Image (cartoon, coloured by chain):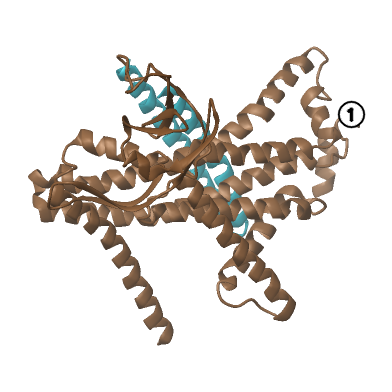
Amino acid sequence: MVTYNLIGAGLIVIGAGFGLGQIGGKAMEGIARQPEAAGKIQTAMIIVAALLEGLAFGALILGK
Amino acid sequence: MRIFQQSFKFLALTVLVFLSTTIYAQSSHEDGGQIDTREEVDAYISHHLQDSHDFTFFSYTSDEGERKHAGFPLPMILWSSDGLVTFMSSEFHHNDDGHVIVEKNGLKFAKIHSKIYELEAGATAVNFDAEHHATNGARVLDFSITKSVVGILVIGLLMFFWFVRLAKQYKTKKIPTGFGRVLEPLVLYVRDEIARPNIGEKHYRKFTGYLLTVFFFIWLLNMVGLTPLGFNVTGQIAVTACLAIFTLIIYAVSGNKDFWMHILWMPGVPILIRPILAVIELVGTFIIKPFSLLVRLFANITAGHTVIMALIAIMFVMKDTLGVAGATGLSFILSVLIMFIEVLVAFLQAYIFTMLSALFIGMAVAEHDHEHDHKVVDAEDVRSDFV
């Protein structure tokens, strides 16, 4: 039973890591293309990252 | 030159504080050998993450082999089957596994893993079942001033004095002095970067007070949690749940007609879809949004504390492999580095909580210009706006 939980936790972390990478990478790209919009892009990036993080933590805690 | 000297002093002080944490942990190992194995480290970390009924700075074993605790007791306020019972937590003598029974008003109390049980009449000791649950006791309502409550009260009072002083200074001076100079840019940041863009020019003033309170409350408690005092207030799920419920109440109460319309009877979609959407929106508004707020803060702070304590524990677990000096050095470098990240996380989590609260409130008070049922936007119209 414990093993399944750990596999699930690993999957969650892989998914969340992939998602965070996407968000960060795309934000970098956006800032490089349009440096004057850096502030707005950063805010939006943090919000999306926070939502993703909430989901990942929720899954980790529910799966514990 | 003066700035250089001051910043050097500050840096030296910071390093000293971090050193004191590690040195304390090191000495506690040497004179008692209390934490050596992985299981003991696990138990120590989970004990730290819990709230406690005493305020203990550190514990040590005296020359006579007796466990001593430096700190002070806190008042216990219990609502038992016989009404209100109060006494000091020192009567439990730092016992946390139910062996010390305190008798008050003819009732017997035992403390098991920071939870207070009232024993049944006639019982003299706690009986445990196979899963280590008490079988002859019942939980009482616990209103004690625990360590977390002390933290909340101290930070609340500090915030009250700081902000009253800051507000008074604007009446007599042009610019604030002293600590007000640290607070002013943060206040302006929360107002201009969080409240105004997310709630909107028209309504933001009404909610700025709440957002400022919640921002400074979370930020200061996160920072206090990083000091060797050992607070873990924002890592208590009850505290974060309370904060999330405040946000929920505020956006539910201040929601306008359009907000409720979009939840209960979404305009612009086929009639048969609307009840399904209503269910989804209700769950999203009343469960998922507050749940994500509370879980994010709780899990981030808990994870941070666990990582810091695990890195400090490296020096005990790896002292045989790396030698005492090597293990201590490795643990010191890693824990200082993670401390810097945690200082950032402390601010970031306060920012995100405030930001998302502002976003949710903004959604509730947003005024729609009813474009849904007006006209189908023509690609040519849009093009003509730009060209």
| Quarter of the rendering occupied by the N terminus of chain A | top left
Q: Is residue B385 left or right of residue B250?
A: right
Up the image or down, B61 lies above or below B135; here it is: below
Residue appearing at x 59%, y 38% in the figure: B242
Residue B317 figure quarter: top left
Is residue B146 in view? yes
Q: Is residue B45 left or right of residue B61?
A: right
Q: Position of residue A24 (x, y in %)?
A: 49, 45
Q: Which chain is brown?
A: B
In the rendered image of the structure, the colour used to display chain A is cyan
Neighbours of disc 1 within 10 Å: few (<14), some (14-19), many (20+): few
Residue appearing at x 24%, y 39% in the figure: B41
User: Looking at the image, which is closer to me, B144 or B104?
Assistant: B104
Q: Chain of mark 1?
A: B
User: Looking at the image, which is closer to me, B231 or B263?
Assistant: B231
Residue bearing mark 1 = B373
